[in-house]
Structure formats: C-alpha cells, structure tokens
Amino acid sequence: MLQRLEQQAPDALLALIKLYADDTRSDKIDLGVGVYRTGQGDTPVFGAIKGAEKWLVENQDSKSYLGPEGDLGFVHALMPYIFGSDATMGGRLEGMQTPGGTGAVRLAVALAKQMGVTKLHMGTPSWPNHAQIIKDIDLDWQAFDHANADGTANIDAVLAAINGAGKGEAVLLHGCCHNPTGIDYTIDQWEAIGDALASSGTFPIIDTAYQGLGEGMDEDAAGMRSVLAKVPEAFICYSCDKNFGMYRDRVGAFYIMAEKGDEGSETLEKAFSNANALARASWSMPPDHGAAAVRVILRDTALTQEWLDEVAMMRARMREVREYLGKAGMAGSVDFAPLAQQNGLFSMLPVTKEQVQALREDHGVYMAGSGRINIAGLTMDNIDKFIAAVADVTGS
Ligand code: LMR
C-alpha cells in the first residue's frame, strides 16, 4: 500500500533552512524563512515572553485539557490590539485559539467551504502555503495580480476580482506586511476595497500575520478595521508567531464577525460550533503554552509595555535596513529603491530562478526561489556584501 504514494517535494521554503545549515561558509547570509533577526543575526526569545514563562512556571497549576477553542483568555486579551477600542464590534466578533496563523487560515478556508463558498479569490504572489491549504481543502480558487511592476499595489485588480465575485464567493486579503511582496494597500485603497466588498457581497477573509512589524500596531490594523466597519461578515486569521517571536510554539487565533443585529444571536454560536468541530477533527485543541504566555503578558501592564517596546525595536531595525537598501538604489539590474516604501519582513527582488541559484551557490546568499528576501536577515555587517552579490549576478 505504501508504494502507491508518490514522492512529494519538500516544502521549498522550509527546505532552505536545512540547505543553509549545511553550508559551511562563514559569511553566508540567510534571507529565507520568515523569522525576525537582530542586528547580530539572532532570533532571541522576547524578554516579555521570558517574564511570562517565569510567571507560568510559578503559577500555572494545571495542564488539563481545554476545549477545541483553546485559551479564550488569550483570544479576548488580543482583541483590543487587533480590532481597536470597540474590540467586539458591539458583540459581533468572537474568536478561538488556533495552532499558529496557519491553523486559522485552514479553519477559515474549511469553514468557507462548509458554508457554501464556491470560489476563493487571492492576489498572487502570496504566501505559498495559502494555495497549498486551499488545494488541500479542495476549494476552487482564482488568482488576481497583487502588485504592479513599479512596486505599488494593483488596486484595480483586487477591485475587479471583488466586484466580479459577489455573494457566494470569497476573497483572501493580507491585513498588513504582505507576504511575499511587502506591498500593502494604502488606507484609501482599503476604503475602496471595503466599499466594493459591501456592495458586491463578496466574503472577506483577512490574514494578519505580522501586525506591528510594518508601521505600528494600530497603523498596521487600520486597513483591516476600515473594511470591518463596512462589511456585514468576515473571517480574520491572526498570528502571534512573529510579533511575539513564538514561531515554533504555534500561537494563532481565528475570529468571526457576524452581521449587525446578530449580536449575541445564534449566528456566531452556530458558526463557532462548526469551527470547533473542524478544529476537533484536525488538531483536537491547540497547543497551550505560547498562548498562555501571551495572555500573561497582555494582562500585565509592565510586560505589555516590554512587549510593545520589543515590537517597536524590531520595526525600527527593519525600517533602517529598508532605508539603507532604498538609498543603495540600483545593483546590477535590481532597483532597491521601492523596498524603502514597503512593509514588514519581506520584499521581492526581480530575479530569475537561475540568479537565485547563483546567489546561493556563488555568494552564500539564501532566498526563496520566488526572489523573496527576509529583510531581517540583513545586518549592517552583511548588507554591503549582499548588495554587491546582487549586482554581480544581475549585472550584464
Ligand atoms: C514564511 O513565509 O517564511 C513564514 O510564514 C514561515 C512559514 O511558515 O512559511
């Protein structure tokens, strides 16, 4: 029976971690998988997380089961940071904990299918796992272009997709720090997207995995909040893996917004009964530790401030790298200038697969095959070498 299985290629992004680890060159540069790195190239555990973990060691008195919805204290403590001062939108919003943002996206797509969504529209390029999840759940999907060649968001394409979709179809949007392009919609564009969603009836699924790593905690949520103020219903997928540095602890949440007038009604309860059943059949319940640590932070003023300061520090470092690249301008055929206007961990370089391979083999520079780079992999010590490497492989 086992021989009937076909060999699958390893996930290209995760395979880079191993390739990089096996490279013995001391000046190699890792711009692959999306983890934050300090100016020294480390991915340390946040001070606020250490503080919360210490508290948990001393005070957590049970590791008995929670339900498929996980730690609701964590889910609710996050809401003001994601949704703002009226965090429940007058009772229209509720959530559950998921294993990372991936778990939330999986629930969103599975639930969309269950409630009769026939097609999902998605801007490409996107995080490669989006397409894998959609395919695995066997939902039909259609691509539209996320970005223009000049490094701006293609607002016409997303509006055409939403207006052409309508009731019964859904659109998947990145809330901020677009992965892989770093190209976000402006607030005016988000307003137009919200209007198009409201008039067409297309169902929004918003994936927010990098809040705070772009322009600020509130700034990065502003577009999503403006959409939620206009539409009747939505799914929101959230990850704490980056903005709390919890990657392998898998900390995420899935929120559902119901129609106005449905406050406290059966609609949300019914929707979550389905989401809980899907979670139970997939992972039973999410891993507790990371979410518990985030809850401890958000219930403690000093730890919350420490966490916000750490996020601000990450943001400032990535902005510094982007500005340096922006000032560098052209390197070979690559123009770094647009990267200064982009947000978050990622940007895309207009390079071929062969050039990506040459960067890896000749210069020890590791990036995704798509040309995506992790901005946080660059430091003031390696950035000039990186720029020179790009000039070398793309210059004529
Ligand atoms: C990435 O895009 O590098 C991260 O989101 C890690 C992942 O799970 O792919």
Image: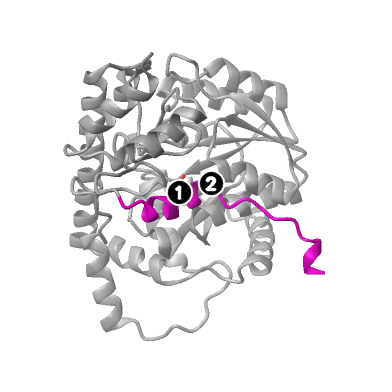
Foreground: 263 or 317? 317
The region drawn magenta spans: 1-24
Q: Residues within 10 Å of mark 2 (few under 14, many from 20)?
A: few
The answer to whether residue 234 is visible is no
Question: In the image, is residue 383 part of the stretch drawn in magenta?
Answer: no
Q: Residue 128: where, in percent of width, then height? A: 56, 41
* Amino acid at pointer 1: Leu
Q: Position of residue 19 (x, y in %)?
A: 43, 51
Question: Which residue appears at 64% of the width and 18% of the height?
Answer: 160
Please determine whether, in this image, residue 62 is positioned above or below residue 127. below
Q: How would you rate the neighbour count of disc 1 (Cα within 10 Å): few for under 14, some for 14-19, many for 20 or more?
A: many
Mark 1 vs ligand 1: CB under 8 Å? no
- What is the C-alpha distance between the residues marked 2 and 1? 7 Å
In x, y percent, where is residue 296?
Answer: 31, 68
Residue topped by disc 1: 16
At horizontal 45% and vertical 61% (from top left) the residue drawn is: 250
- Height in image: 60 above or below 153? below
